[in-house]
Image: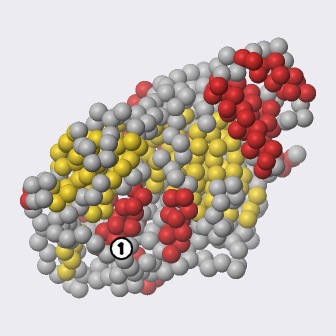
Amino acid sequence: MAYSISPNRIYQQPDEYQTFLFHCFTHLHNLACLLHLKKQRNSMTQPTLFSFIFFLTNLLVSGKHIPTTLQGPFHPITIHFDPSLRRGSDDIPMDDPRLKKNVTSMFPEQIALALCTPTSMWVSWVTGDAQIGPNVTALDPTSVASEVWYGKESGKYSSKKRGNATVYSQLYPFEGLFNYTSAIIHHVRIDGLEPETKYYYRCGDSSLPAMSEEHVFETLPLPAQNSYPRRIAVIGDLGLTRNSSTTIDHLSKNDPSLILMVGDLTYANQYLTTGGKGVPCFSCAFPDAPIRETYQPRWDGWGRYMEPLVSRVPMMVIEGNHEIEPQAAGITFKSYLTRFAVPAKESGSSSNLYYSFDAGGVHFIMLGAYVDYNSTGAQYAWLKEDLRKVDRTVTPWLVAAWHPPWYNSYSSHYQEFECMRQEMEQLLYHYGVDIVFSGHVHAYERMNRVYNYTLDACGPIYITVGDGGNIEKVDVDHADEPGKCPSQGDNMPEIGGVCHLNFSSGPAKGNFCWDRQPEWSAYRESSFGHGILEVLNSTYALWSWHRNQDTYKEDSPGDQIYIVRQPDICSPSTSLKVISHFNIYSH
C-alpha cells in the first residue's frame, strides 16, 4: 500500500511525523521526501528531531534496510537447520551451583517480579525446604511472614507491605513414585508505585529476622499513546538446558524492561518423580509409567536459575502443556498456579490461566489454550468483555499470547489447536489484534498478516517463538516437505477437541498440507533463540529475533521487521474493514 507524501503539509504530532519519517527512510531516493524534510525541519519538536537523527544515522551507518509489514506480504523464506549444530543439549544438573539452594533456614530465594496494575507489582519468593519421597508432610505457611520493604533510595524503605503464603503438593498414588510438597511460596502486591521510577526492595520476614538482600527494579510507563516499555523480551519453551542458558544470557544482554514467557517453563515433566536424568521424549523412555510424572525439584532449580533476571525485570507467564502436570484426583496445573502471581482478578478473570494487563501503551491478552476456550465458555466471555473495554487511544497496541500456535507450517503440532482458532480468531480479528505470540513448536516462524488462512492486510502478525532451548530439541521438519505431512490422526491436543481440516481455497485447496511453504508463512528457521519487541510509537514497532548460535550482537538479528499498525483502514470501530487479499505466488 503506497504512502501519500504531501510536500506542503506540516506535521504537528510527533507520532504522525515519525510515521512519515519511516516511510521516507524506506525510500530515501524519493524527492518528495527530501523536499518535505527541508520544509518540516523548523517545526520539529526536540524528541521528533532526535528520532529523525537516530533512525537516519542508524540506516546510513549500518547500511541495512529493515523491511516493514507495509511492504508485505513477503515471499516465504525457509532457513533449514544448520547440520554443524546440535539439535539439543542435556539439562543442567541439579548439583549445578546455579540450581542449588544457597540460602539457609527461612531466608528468601527464587525471588521474582510480575506486573499487576500500572501502579503495582507482585513480588514472589520461596522460603523453607521442599520435601520429596514416599511420605511428605506439608509445611505450615503461617509459620513465616510475607513482607516487602521498598523505597526510592537504596537502603531507605519508606513503604512496607504484607501478603500471603501457601504451599502445594504433587501426589501420586502409585507404588514407586515419589510425592512432593513445596516450600512456602509468598506473594506480596506492592502498590502506589510511580511510573518510570527505580525502586529498591527487600523481602522476607523481619521478625525472624530473615530478609533478603536488596534488589532493584524500574517501573514501566503508565498507559498512554506515546509511552512504551523500552524493550519487551519474548521467549517460549525455555526449559533448563545448556541451550536455555545461552538464550537467557543473550536475553539479559538485551536489557529488557519486561519479559513475556509464552508457556512451557521448566520441563519438570521430562523426569520420573525419583529424579535422575531428563529425557527428550517421556513416553518413549518410560512407556510403562502409570501417569505423566514430574520431578518437582526442577521447578525450584529453575526459580533459582532465573532469579538474577526476574528479581529485577517483571516476567509475565502463560501456561503451556508441560505445566498441566496431572496428579491424584485429576488435579492439574498445581505448581504453575501456586508459584506465579498474575493479575487475573485485576483484569476481571476468574482464572489464573488467562488474564490481561497493560504495559505503557500496549494491552496484553494472555489466553489459556488448556482450559475451555469455546464461545459458550467463561474464558470467551471474559475475552469479549476485555476486548470491548480496550481504549485504543490510550493503549493503541493490542498484543495477544498463548502457548500453541494457530498458524504453523512445521510438522510438529501441525493444526493441533485448530479448534481454538475456529472459536476465537474472528473475535480477535474484529477487535484488531496487532501481534500474536506463541510457542510450542521448537523453532521460529513469522507469518504474513493472515486471517482464516487468507492473506489479509488487517490480520495480526503471528509469531512462533517456541525456541527457548528445551530438552526436546529443535524442530526441523516442515509439513509441506515430501513425506513430512502428518496424518489427521496425529497432533492431538492434550486438552481440547480436534478440528483438523483440509484447505477450502487457494493453492492448497482440498489438501491437508501445502506442497510448498504456505503463502501465510513469511519466514521460518530451525534454531533456538529469543525475540525482542521495541514499540516506537502508536503505529511502529521493531521486532528482532536473535539466534543462539550467533556471536551475540544487538545489530545482527536472524530476523527483523518493523510491524506497522494501520488504524485508519483496520479500526475495529469501522463497520467494514478494508481487506486486501493477495496471492504472492502469482507475482
Residue sitting nearer the eye, 48 or 564: 48
Is residue 246 in view from this perspective? yes
Identify the residue at horizontal 32%, vertical 75% (top origin): 100
Amino acid, disc 1: Leu
In this rendering, position of residue 72 left or right of residue 459? right
Residue sitting nearer the eye, 22 or 371: 22
Residue sitting nearer the eye, 262 or 287: 262
In this rendering, position of residue 286 left or right of residue 566? left
Q: Which residue is mark 1?
A: 99
Q: Residues within 10 Å of mark 1 (few under 14, many from 20)?
A: many
**Which image quadrant: the N terminus?**
top right
Using the rendered view, name the quadrant where residue 279 is placed: bottom left
Rendered location of residue 370, percent (x, y): 40, 55
Q: Secondary structure at mark 1?
A: loop
Rendered location of residue 587, percent (x, y): 88, 45
Is residue 67 in view from this perspective? no
In this rendering, position of residue 133 left or right of residue 255? left
Rendered location of residue 297, percent (x, y): 30, 73
Rendered location of residue 307, percent (x, y): 36, 61
Using the rendered view, name the quadrant where residue 208 is placed: bottom left
Q: How many numbered discs? A: 1
Identify the residue at horizontal 54%, vertical 46% (top origin): 231
Q: Compared to 504, does 333 lie above or below? A: below
Q: Compared to 239, does 401 lie above or below? A: above
Identify the residue at horizontal 36%, vertical 55% (top origin): 311
Residue sitting nearer the eye, 222 or 517: 222
Q: Name the image colouring.
A: secondary structure
